[in-house]
């Protein structure tokens, strides 16, 4: 009697996952970017807690990653999708000094507003009032914005120069895992 052989998959799992992601990206671009933003934002929050837990022996707060997931799904994914599309129309990648112009728009206009939105939405999702929001802005906004400029400026140089438009949100989300871990720690201060 001969052994039963199963037919091996023709492509590795990573290739099949990428093909599935590309299909979803083509069919449902905003929803796909929102879902990946939600997942990776929550992962960043969990990472922050795991690091903090190992230092302070605390238990995990599962509500925080849910808040980060909601923020990623409702704001980061959709807003980033439309921002990159708009930026491509406003400053085409082949325009003279396109990289510098895009960086100026992103770093000086969009980033400060996006960071303020993060603080506002998280304040709301935590059930806090506007006086708490004001305190958080005073204590953490400027520090976070300076860190944003340090971290995200080189990231955006890579993103605008080498990453195709359809993958710019995903690339940003992958880096944002660490960024959201940082923001989660700032938010707690």
Image: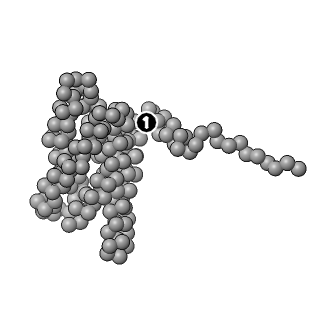
Q: Looking at the picture, does residue 166 appear above or below residue 34?
A: above
Secondary structure found at label 1: helix
Q: Looking at the picture, does residue 42 appear above or below residue 54?
A: above
Q: Quadrant of residue 139?
A: bottom left
Q: Nearer the viewer, residue 86 or 73?
A: 86
Q: Nearer the viewer, residue 7 or 30?
A: 7
Query: Can you give x and y, in whole percent of width and height, for residue 124 in the image?
Result: 23, 57
Instruction: Specify whether 181 is left or right of 12.
Output: left
Q: So how many labels did they put on this image? A: 1
Q: Residue visible at 40% across and 51% down?
A: 39
Residue lying farthest to the right in this orientation: 1
Q: Residue visible at 37% across and 37% down?
A: 167
Q: Can you say which quadrant of the picture contains the C terminus? A: bottom left
Q: Which of 123 and 188 is in front in this view?
A: 188
Query: Can you give x and y, in whole percent of width and height, for residue 70 in the image?
Result: 34, 53
Q: In which quarter of the image is residue 91?
A: top left
Q: Can residue 130 be seen in this view?
A: no
Dot 1: few (<14), some (14–19), or many (≥20) neighbours within 10 Å? Answer: some
Query: Can you give x and y, in whole percent of width and height, for residue 50 in the image?
Result: 37, 66
Q: Looking at the picture, does residue 74 appear above or below residue 141?
A: above
Residue lying farthest to the top in this orientation: 95
Residue lying farthest to the bottom in this orientation: 57
Q: Quadrant of residue 158?
A: top left
Instruction: Specify whether 83 is left or right of 25.
Output: left
Which residue in the protein does label 1 denote?
25
Query: Can you give x and y, in whole percent of width and height, for residue 40 in the image?
Result: 38, 51
Q: Residue visible at 73% across and 45% down?
A: 6
């Amino acid at each position: 009697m001969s052994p039963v052989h199963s037919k091996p998959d023709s492509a590795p799992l990573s290739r099949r996952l990428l093909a599935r992601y590309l299909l979803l990206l083509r069919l449902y671009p905003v929803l796909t970017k929102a879902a990946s933003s939600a997942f990776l934002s929550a992962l960043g929050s969990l990472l922050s807690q795991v690091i903090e837990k190992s230092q302070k022996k605390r238990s995990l707060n599962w509500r925080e990653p849910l808040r980060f997931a909601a923020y990623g799904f409702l704001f980061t994914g959709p807003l980033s999708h439309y921002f990159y599309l708009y930026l491509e129309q406003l400053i085409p990648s082949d325009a003279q000094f396109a990289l510098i112009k895009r960086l100026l728009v992103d770093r000086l206009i969009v980033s400060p507003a996006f960071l303020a939105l993060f603080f506002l939405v998280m304040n709301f999702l935590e059930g806090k009032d506007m006086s708490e929001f004001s305190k958080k802005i005073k204590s953490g906004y400027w520090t976070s914005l300076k860190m944003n400029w340090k971290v995200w400026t080189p990231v955006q140089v890579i993103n605008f120069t080498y990453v195709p438009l359809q993958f710019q949100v995903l690339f940003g989300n992958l880096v944002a895992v660490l960024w959201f871990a940082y923001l989660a720690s700032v938010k707690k201060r």
